[in-house]
Amino acid sequence: MARKDPLPVFCFKVSLPGVAGDAFFKSVSGLRSETEVVPVREGGQNATTFQLVGATKWSNIVLKQGFTKDSGLLAWRNEWLGPRGGKRVGGTITLLNTALEGAAEWSFVRGWPVKWEISEFDASKSELAIETLEIAHEGITFTGLADATK
């Protein structure tokens, strides 16, 4: 029987075709969804409230990376600040195993940048400038890739 070791969180890559291509980030968060619960009381049924399925909400994906003067993320955000808006893109976040092979993948659709920021500038610290981009989207699908944990 093959072992199913947990995957490390420090090995991943992000693909944003048309924006940043394949890029490496310091962190990725926001891979979550929540389905609303709609409580309904039925007449004559005083002992319980029925819990119906409501709409599913997707959290914004948050990407962080070291800032460079040629930031594709900032250029994409700036497109959305113009009068015509910008383009929506799909993307993938791939979790890699320790051999740097794809082990799991999340794909999002119709993403657009809703927030961009850069870390605080502080002359007393010796740190990299980190840019953060939040992407709103219309859903995430999970794909378990071929067994790369051998």
Image (cartoon, rainbow, N blue to C red):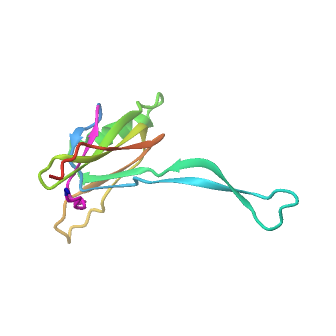
Residue at the limit of the structure toward the left, as seen here: 99
Residue at image x 44%, y 54%? 32
Decide whether the magenta segment is chiefly helix, strand or loop.
loop
Residue at the limit of the structure toward the right, as seen here: 44
Whether the magenta-drawn stretch holds residue 10 is answered as: yes
Q: Is residue 107 above or below residue 2?
A: above
Residue at the limit of the structure toward the bottom, as seen here: 124
Q: Give how far across and how far down residue 58 sits, in percent.
A: 49, 49
Whether the magenta-drawn stretch holds residue 146 is answered as: no
Q: Is residue 105 left or right of residue 44?
A: left
Residue situated in front as seen by the camera: 100 or 128: 100
Residue at image x 56%, y 52%? 35
Residue situated in front as seen by the camera: 129 or 50: 50
Residue at image x 87%, y 57%? 43
Residue at image x 82%, y 56%? 42
Q: Give how far across and how far down residue 75 sits, in percent.
A: 31, 37
Q: Give how far across and how far down residue 12 sits, in percent.
A: 23, 51
Q: Which quarter of the rendering shows the N terminus?
A: bottom left
Residue situated in front as seen by the camera: 27 or 5: 5
Magenta region: 3-17
Residue 49 lies in quadrant: bottom right
Q: Give how far across and how far down residue 88 sits, in percent.
A: 41, 33
